[in-house]
Image (spheres, rainbow, N blue to C red):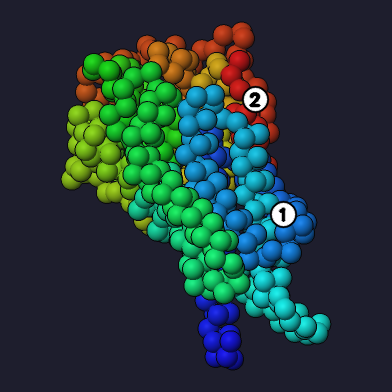
Amino acid sequence: MTRGGHRLWRLLLLISVGICAACGLVYELALISLATSTGGGGIVETSLIVAGYVAALGLGAVAARPLLRWPAEAFLGVEAVLGIVGGFSAMILYASFAVVGQSLLLLVAATALIGVLVGAELPLLLTLVQQGKTVDARGAGRVVATLNVADYAGALLGGLAWPFLLLPLFGLIRGTAAAGLCNLVAALFLACVVLRSRLSRRRLWAAGGGLLVGIAMILGLIFFSPSWVVTARQQLYADPVVYAHQSQYQDIVVTQRGKDRRLYLNGGLQYSTRDEHRYTESLVYPVLRGRGERVLVIGGGDGLAARELARMDAEVVQVELDPEVIEVANTVLREDNGGALEGENVTLIVDDAFTWLRGGGDGTAFDAVIIDLPDPDNETMARLYSEEFYALARSVLAPEGRMTVQASSAYSTPEVFWRVHSTLKAAGCAEVVPYHMLVPTFGDWGFQLCAPAGESVRVPQGAPPLRYASNEVLAAATVFGEDNQPRDLAPSTLDRPFIVEDMRRGYR
């Protein structure tokens, strides 16, 4: 091979290495995304995936030692297995979750297997590049550095491709399969073009045939996975699924049986049309003093709070992180919210609420703040239940302004409920009024009102006819049984997100 030919050979090899490295990282990011979508995916799951992956890389490097005698064949074999395993990993784990529930053991096992395969790549590549050559220490160092550059550049490519390309365009299952397809196609290119001269005809045909079989399997997965996912997803829900989509942030599912329509985010029920009026009225009306107020809604992407605020002629600024939830609210759920999010009284801001508040909001004060967010079952959500976040929310309130927070089940998760109470007090609320309502779909559900000293929960003046809430109902809602009296708990903060552990202790 001429010097120019050798340079071209190395360049093609390095490009293929970068593509394979990108795919390897995509598999791990997909597992983290899957852990988040199916089980909340907190620090424990993320740490186990990342640490397990890094540890498996070292194990894979050691496991590759017996294969160094056949570096070309072994590398192609590793890539074939990695492409198939990685490409199918999300589908297999999702199906497993649908049947048996979240399995941390299975998640760690998948991480370890992928890590071992990726870890075997570098020693095989190093042997492949140096095969038949005598190099000094400096030359070996240059080879390692070059391979590392290709490997890390590929990892950067994969890290950018997953959130900005694969996941938004193809979704979790098919996005992971697409990475597997790229992995196998890159390996096939290596076999047919770059490594062809280093393989016997028999081994070349074997490698090519194996990779083509893998490519066919992945193409089948990409083609059939939508129907498989529908079948697997339906196992998770008692009612027929009428809409499902994996957004950049969460898995959005809507089910319907008869007149009962339900919204789920990451598997957690957000509301049922059977009784959502109990929840929505209890969240919205106690925070208002009268008609025409200026209200900030944080979360509430289903549009139900905005619906009730429209009945009070309120001027609404709503901050929602996920634009796809808003899209679902304006289409699939429009009958439930009456198109409230498209009303002239609503200003929608698609942003992270913490970041938006940290930037000073819109520079004006609000008469009321409503915080309607999913339960804090992971560290990402816990920051929106922290002392720091509540202090930021209070900073945009007018002097006599009030704030309500959904606070999970007052009975089933009392630690969460009373933790929110303590955290609001620590954030500077003069009066924190805990109250709870029976929402049959959810059970005994709790709320907290942050208000000036001496105030209580009540239906505001000028309220329209309500289906559930009344002054008598709200007064009774502030009474708690002997088995659920107030608890003096430390506030949840960014540094110490106690509320996540409260959630993980489960339901009593």
Of helix, strand and loop, which one carries label 2?
loop
**As shown in the figure, which amino acid type bears the numbered disc 1?**
Gly
Q: Mark 1 points at which residue?
A: 60
Q: Residue 52 in the image: state x and y as whole percent.
A: 69, 47
Residue depicted at x 45% and y 54%? 212
Q: Which of 264 and 53 is in front in this view?
A: 53
Could you tell me residue 180's position as x and y percent? 48, 53
Q: Residue at x 61, y 23 (%)?
A: 506
Q: In this rendering, which labeled residue sits more in front, label 1 or label 2?
A: 1
Residue placed furthest toward the top: 482
> Is residue 234 at all visible to an observer of this figure?
yes
Quarter placement of the N terminus: bottom right
Quadrant position of residue 234 = top left
Tag 1, which secondary structure?
Answer: helix
- Image quadrant containing the C terminus: top right
N-term mark: 1 or 2: 1
Please give the name of the residue rendered at 42% of the width and 59% of the height, measured from the top-left corner: 164
Q: Which amino acid does label 2 sit on?
A: Arg
Residue beneath disc 2 = 505
Query: Disc count in the image?
Result: 2
Spatial CA span between label 1 and label 2:
36 Å
